[in-house]
Amino acid sequence: MSDTSLPESIGLSTERLERAYRLLAVAVERGELPAAALLVARHGVALPARAFGRLRLDGASPAARPDTIFLVASVTKPVAVAGAMLLVERGQLTLDDPVCAHIPEFAENGKEGVLVRHLMTHTSGLPDMLPENYDLRREHAPLSEFARRVCRLALEFEPGTRIQYQSMGILILAQIAERIAGMPFPEFLRQELFAPLSMSDTSLGVGPLNTERIAHVNVPEEMRGTDWGWNTPYWWGLGAPWGGMFSTVSDIWRFLQMFLNGGRFAGVQVLGRATAEAMVRDQTGAMPELPPAERKVQSWGLGWRRFPFGSTFGDLLSPLAFGHSGATGTVVWADPARELACALFTTEPSANSRRLLGRCSNAVAAAAL
């Protein structure tokens, strides 16, 4: 009987995989990384997660553990989209629904042409963040105020004519889901995704999670000393659908593996196979008004980024791979060509850790035998 804790038992090289772990350990030793956790899986079997560093930004805090909870930032986005896609497969929503059919006030300033698919593919014409993003956070504004401000915006370009990363599109998508489901979006995700997948350490907003297990982010200068940054009760409680989810590497692997399994995990069909396949398939390549140059530079499924990837994902993923990264220093990806999945969470913002994340991803991808 094989030992499934050994990388070779699932077609991975121990020696090559150790390079990824060593990169993280050395970065912690050098003070370049406060904390990290890495989980690698192949053929549907996850190796034990490994953790590095400490939970807090002082040397006296407890060590990070394999089950440490991280603020995953924009890794939240494909989870939010998956929630909305449950409504699509149930016939309560379609990708070509105008957003204003569900949120009439969104039509202000000529936004009638924005479709649900535009929100999921970063082609809506909405900005990434509101111009007054930091001001609203300083005021501890609720999500409803963010959404109200988005509804008043004019678009930056015609829907479907450009790809521009847009967190505010995911906010509006979550608002649609709330109105259709008749419940707060964090609760909808808990009932419909997290519970069926046994993601017991995952929540949009801190919710019921044990805050003592959460690793604090080494926040950028503009957030230090504030009461609205990534480590504050305000942000933890906001539940921003574009970047406010908390999770562990083990939990997020379950979500990744579900897509590799065609929407199924541990005997439970959480998403329909057609739904899972649509989310990881190239959706922007077929948009007729997108300039060819834009389609070559980036490709999006529904919520998932596809090949070609940015540097955070490394250089060795196949064109079938899909994934997402987050500003708090997180990256997750799965490569169907190798049946390989990787979940890497850190507490060093990606502005500083992007190259390290890419090097670790390369080491993980290269470990496949």
Image (cartoon, grey):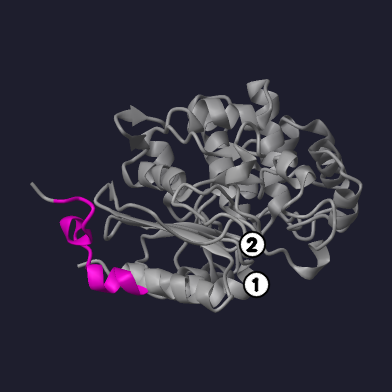
- CB within 8 Å, label 2 to label 1: yes
The residue drawn where x is 43% and y is 38% is 275
Mark 1: secondary structure: helix
Residue at mark 2: 327
Quarter of the image holding residue 333?
bottom left
Nearer the observer, 266 or 273:
266
Q: Which mark is residue 351?
A: 1
Query: Does residue 314 appear in the picture of this structure?
Result: no
> Residue 350's x, y, as percent?
61, 68
Quarter of the image holding residue 263?
top left
Cα distance in 3D space between marks 2 and 1: 7 Å
**Amino acid tagged 1:** Ala
User: Compared to 49, does 186 lie above or below?
Assistant: above
> Residue 114's x, y, as percent?
71, 46
The residue drawn where x is 42% and y is 71% is 360
Check if residue 14 falls in the magenta segment.
yes
Quarter of the image holding residue 62?
bottom right
Dividing the image into 4 quarters, which one contains the C terminus? bottom left
Q: Which mark is residue 79?
A: none
Q: Residue furthest front?
A: 60
